[in-house]
Every structure is written in structure tokens, then in C-alpha cells.
């Protein structure tokens, strides 16, 4: 690390949503009273990339954790001056079986359920938000292009269907798709979907 200058950034200088939800472990950090040691993984060299250190307070940490689908944070220790010293992050991994994703794509005719496009890569979107216990089962998933998935973000499904973003992209949506999206609310389908509950291990 000798000679490496690490500029200090905050969240106000970085739009986390531009980075997506991918979490990549690049190294491990150790610290003693005087030095912070950054141990990069062998396949993650610094060359060609400028490292940046984000100095985050607890509110900023909550934003980062929310963006990365981590459900819990816990302050482990505070320094004598009250500043954040260490944080424990407990992550509940969002894992969707490939078979489940393809089942949803086939059901939705390989089109985004929100804008109707079939010429873009698809993801699956949780009707009941994953962060709120929505399970990764076909009944709680719809095919969605990346843009629509990102635009919805963490809106409740009802709020999303009434949002200007959905109303705009859904103008060219096939009538059967539009009706299917609305029926989810009108027929109370969300109430029939089981919730996933987070269990904290010892």
C-alpha cells in the first residue's frame, strides 16, 4: 500500500444504484491502533484501478446495506468519542434457482411484464418485496427487464402500478399483460403468497 493515495468519498458523491446489487469480495481489512492493512485477493490487483475509501456514518451504512440486500446491521463497538468503530453485517442471501427463473420467463412469454419488451435481458422481480419476506417462488415473481426492475426499486407493488414510471413504460403493453398485472391486486393474490421470515442464528 505504500504510495497509494486513497481519496475519501461519501455517498453524496456516489450513486449506489449505478453500481447495481452485485457484491464482490475483493479483499480483507485488518487494523491495529496505528495501521489499516488491506489484503487484496490474488486475482484482485490494484493495477489500473484507483481505490476509493468511503467514510460512512450509520445512516449511510443503512443505505448501503439496503442497496446490497443485507437485512441486518448491528453496531459492535463504539470508540470513546462516540464514532462508529465496527459494524456486524448479517446477510440473508437472495438466491433464485435457475429453474424457477426460467419457469417465470416461460409463463410470461419471455417478455417484461411491465413494458412488454422481449428484446432485452430479463430478470425476475418480486411482487412482495424480498426485503419484506417475499419468497422466491413463481407465484411471487414476474419477468422484468433490468430497467423496469431498477425503476420499481423498493416500491410496493400497488404503488408501482400507479407510478408515472410504470404508466409510461406500460403504454405499449399487451392488454392481457396489463390485465394480469392489475388482477394481482384486484383478486388479492398478494395475500395468498406466503412470507419468508428471517431467522437469526446464534
Image: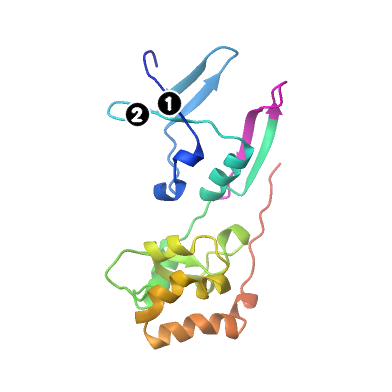
- Could you say which is closer to the camera, residue 193 or residue 129? 129
Residue 3 percent coordinates (x, y)? 36, 14
Q: Residue 190 occupies which quadrant of the picture?
A: bottom right
Q: Secondary structure at mark 1?
A: loop
The answer to whether 5 appears left or right of 95 in the picture is: left
- Please tell me which residue lies in front, 44 or 33: 33
Residue carrying label 2: 50
Q: Residue at left 33%, top 27%?
A: 45
Please provide percent x and percent y for residue 192.
63, 77
Q: Is residue 41 above or below residue 114?
A: above
Number of numbered discs:
2
Mark 2 vs 1: CB contact within 8 A: yes
Q: Where, quadrant-wise, is the C terminus in this rendering?
A: top right
* Up-down relation of residue 107 to residue 148 (above or below): below
The secondary element bearing badge 2 is classed as loop
Q: What residue is at 42 percent from the left and 30 percent from the top?
A: 52
Q: Position of residue 119 (x, y in %)?
A: 27, 70
Location of residue 6 by image quarter: top left
For label 1, the residue is 7
For residue 111, side relative to residue 12 (left or right): left
Magenta span contains residue 126: no
Residue at the image position 68 percent from the left and 52 percent from the top: 199
Q: Earlier in the sequence, mark 2 or mark 1?
A: 1
Residue 86 rendering spot, x and y as whole percentages: 63, 29
* Label 1: few (<14), some (14–19) or many (≥20) C-alpha neighbours in 10 Å: few
Mark 2 → mark 1, Cα distance in angstroms = 9 Å
**What's the residue at 59%, 80% (across, down)?**
189
Whether residue 114 can be seen here: no
**Which span of residues is magenta-colored?**
77-92
Amino acid at each position: 500500500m505504500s504510495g497509494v493515495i486513497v481519496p475519501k468519498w461519501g455517498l453524496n458523491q456516489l450513486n449506489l444504484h449505478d453500481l447495481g446489487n452485485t457484491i464482490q469480495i475483493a479483499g480483507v481489512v485488518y487494523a491495529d491502533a496505528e495501521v489499516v492493512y488491506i489484503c487484496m485477493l490474488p486475482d484482485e490487483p490494484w493495477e489500473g484501478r484507483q481505490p476509493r475509501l468511503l467514510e460512512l456514518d450509520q445512516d449511510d451504512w443503512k443505505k448501503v446495506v439496503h442497496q446490497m440486500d443485507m437485512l441486518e446491521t448491528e453496531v459492535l463497538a463504539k470508540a470513546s468519542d462516540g464514532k462508529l468503530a465496527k459494524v456486524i453485517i448479517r446477510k440473508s442471501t437472495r438466491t433464485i434457482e435457475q429453474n424457477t427463473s426460467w419457469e417465470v420467463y416461460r409463463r410470461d412469454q419471455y417478455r417484461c411484464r411491465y413494458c412488454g419488451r422481449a428484446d432485452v435481458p430479463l430478470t425476475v422481480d418480486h411482487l412482495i418485496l424480498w426485503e419484506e419476506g417475499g419468497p422466491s417462488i413463481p407465484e411471487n415473481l414476474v419477468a422484468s427487464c433490468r430497467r423496469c426492475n431498477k425503476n420499481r426499486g423498493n416500491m410496493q407493488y400497488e404503488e408501482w402500478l400507479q407510478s408515472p414510471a410504470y404508466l409510461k413504460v406500460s403504454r405499449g403493453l399487451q392488454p392481457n399483460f396489463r390485465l394480469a398485472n392489475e388482477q394481482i391486486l384486484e383478486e388479492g393474490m398478494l395475500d395468498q403468497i406466503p412470507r419468508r421470515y428471517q431467522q437469526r442464528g446464534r
